[in-house]
């Protein structure tokens, strides 16, 4: 629950500085020298202020927090203080990650967040498993992991000569401060509502059925999060491009980013989801008894992820446009749907109810954004290649599902995964579903041939 809560609280603790950097950085970079660029300094200051407000708030609402969780989830109350380093370090990392992305350096921070963080977590779990550290030490080190990532990212930015701090107020800040403040605080609501809606289920489960169901739900949520890894990378790359395109009123570029992001995310999302679903029973055989209760929760959450990815960078298109307030309005709708759906469906169907709630709320949420962008800007991301991608995914799945269980879950996963990958990749390339994927693959092959 610690990282789940941290994700919800980061927008509050940064005072929405993260999307503000992406939205307004093109104005800073085009009018200021690097050493005079004060945007990072003020974003960090806003984060310190926001975190201070969060700490004060927890003292005011301490009694309510304890009352909500002490009966069903006492362990959470015992280690509640670890939420502070979790939130603060994640908030600082988010600011530097956004700044790095605005500098068009998005690969390394994604590498840190998606791979290094998981490897370090695995090392800590192994250390606890072999009794090299006790439980308290494990929790403390786990809460400080983002500190390692933050330090690595700061060193990376310093090596690229982009790490500059100045408290001298620039002419751009003086000119745009009012617009940035309005944007930040308005978008703060949008981000907070969206994150709260997407992470509300563990909080409801913890207070109603206890941490055991939360553990099962978090495992399947983490598995489904694998689908989102390409989305995070594409979003980090596309966000500064969209911000620059809106600044220049380049609708052709915006349409290109919107369409390509939809297709690429759909292809990657379907590939990862079907790899998971083909091997889901083998996967649960590797876990302790009880975790298989989350099987169909995983299915519904994964379908929701596919819908979210298939509609492209709709949030980023809205957030960087002149109609960015509609990002807030649609997020309010998402929360208004998600909270009652989770509450009543979890009450009636238990953990499965969280899967139903996620699928219904995400579908409506993305449908609203899709229609709004189409009506207001004349943009929609779907093409004939969208249908090709879905057809390829179904063909590869049907071509692999017939393989029976063989010897061991790991061998079964390896064989099914390899066959599915072969069919899927071959059809994607042969049918030329994505020009980007084809050009990347063939240019890589040509490079390898050239080296030989």
Image (cartoon, rainbow, N blue to C red):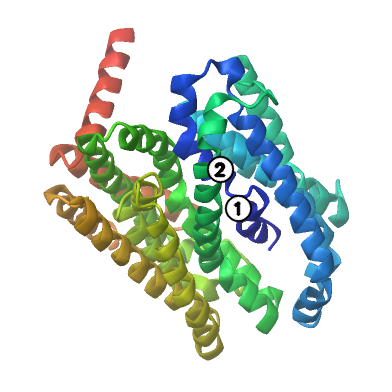
Which residue: 24% across, 62% down?
371
Measured as percent of width and height from the top left, residue 378 is found at: 18, 51
SS assignment at label 2:
helix
Is 379 placed above or below 192 here? Answer: above
Q: Is residue 175 left or right of residue 152?
A: left
Residue beneath disc 1: 11
Of callouts 2 and 1, which one flags the residue occurring earlier in the amino acid sequence? 1
Q: Quadrant of the C terminus?
A: top left
Is 368 placed above or below 377 here? Answer: below
SS assignment at label 1:
helix
In the rendered image, the residue lying farthest to the bottom is: 348
Tag of residue 195: none
Measured as percent of width and height from the top left, residue 299 is found at: 41, 68
Which residue: 42% across, 64% down?
329
Asked if marks 2 and 1 touch (Cβ < 8 Å), the reply is: yes
Residue 54 visible? The answer is: yes
Which is more toward the observer, 142 or 127? 142
Q: Quadrant of residue 135?
A: bottom right
Q: Quadrant of the N terminus?
A: bottom right
Which is more toward the observer, 196 or 32? 32
Q: Is residue 251 left or right of residue 3?
A: left
Is 101 placed above or below 358 here? Answer: above
Which is more toward the observer, 308 or 117? 308
Measured as percent of width and height from the top left, residue 106 is found at: 48, 31
Residue beneath disc 2: 18
């Amino acid at each position: 629950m610690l990282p789940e809560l941290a994700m919800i609280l980061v927008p509050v603790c940064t005072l929405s500085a993260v999307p503000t950097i992406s939205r307004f950085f093109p104005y800073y970079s085009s009018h200021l020298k690097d050493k005079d660029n004060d945007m990072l300094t003020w974003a960090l200051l806003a984060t310190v202020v926001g975190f201070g407000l969060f700490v004060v708030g927890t003292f005011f609402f301490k009694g309510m927090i304890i009352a909500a969780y002490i009966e069903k989830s006492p362990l959470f109350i015992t280690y509640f203080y670890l939420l502070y380093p979790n939130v603060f370090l994640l908030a600082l990392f988010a600011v530097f990650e956004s700044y790095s992305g605005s500098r068009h350096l998005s690969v390394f921070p994604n590498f840190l967040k998606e791979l290094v963080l998981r490897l370090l977590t695995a090392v800590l779990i192994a250390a606890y498993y072999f009794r090299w550290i006790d439980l308290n030490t494990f929790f403390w080190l786990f809460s400080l992991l983002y500190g390692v990532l933050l330090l690595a990212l700061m060193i990376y930015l310093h090596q690229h000569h982009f790490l500059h701090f100045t408290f001298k107020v620039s002419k751009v800040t003086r000119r745009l401060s009012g617009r940035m403040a309005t944007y930040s605080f308005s978008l703060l609501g949008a981000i907070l509502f969206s994150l709260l809606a997407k992470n509300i289920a563990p909080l409801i489960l913890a207070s109603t059925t206890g941490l055991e169901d939360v553990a099962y739900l978090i495992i399947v949520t983490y598995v489904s999060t694998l689908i989102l890894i390409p989305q995070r990378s594409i979003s980090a790359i596309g966000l500064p491009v969209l911000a620059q395109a809106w600044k220049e009123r380049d609708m052709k570029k915006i349409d290109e980013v919107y369409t390509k992001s939809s297709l690429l995310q759909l292809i990657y999302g379907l590939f990862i989801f079907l790899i998971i679903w083909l091997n889901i029973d083998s996967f649960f055989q590797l876990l302790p008894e009880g975790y298989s209760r989350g099987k169909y929760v995983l299915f519904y959450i994964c379908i929701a992820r596919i819908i979210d990815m298939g509609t492209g960078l709709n949030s980023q298109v809205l957030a960087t446009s002149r109609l960015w307030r509609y990002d807030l309005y649609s997020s309010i709708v998402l929360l208004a749907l998600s909270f009652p759906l989770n509450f009543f469906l979890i009450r009636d169907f238990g953990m499965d109810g969280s899967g139903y709630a996620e699928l219904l709320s995400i579908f409506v949420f993305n449908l609203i954004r899709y229609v709004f962008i189409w009506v207001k800007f004349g943009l929609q991301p779907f093409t004939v290649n969208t249908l090709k991608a879905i057809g390829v995914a179904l063909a590869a799945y049907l071509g692999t599902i017939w393989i029976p269980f063989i010897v061991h879950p790991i061998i079964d996963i390896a064989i099914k995964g390899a066959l599915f990958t072969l069919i899927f990749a071959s059809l994607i390339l042969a049918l030329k579903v994505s020009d980007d994927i084809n050009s990347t693959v063939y240019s890589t092959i040509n490079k390898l041939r050239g080296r030989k």
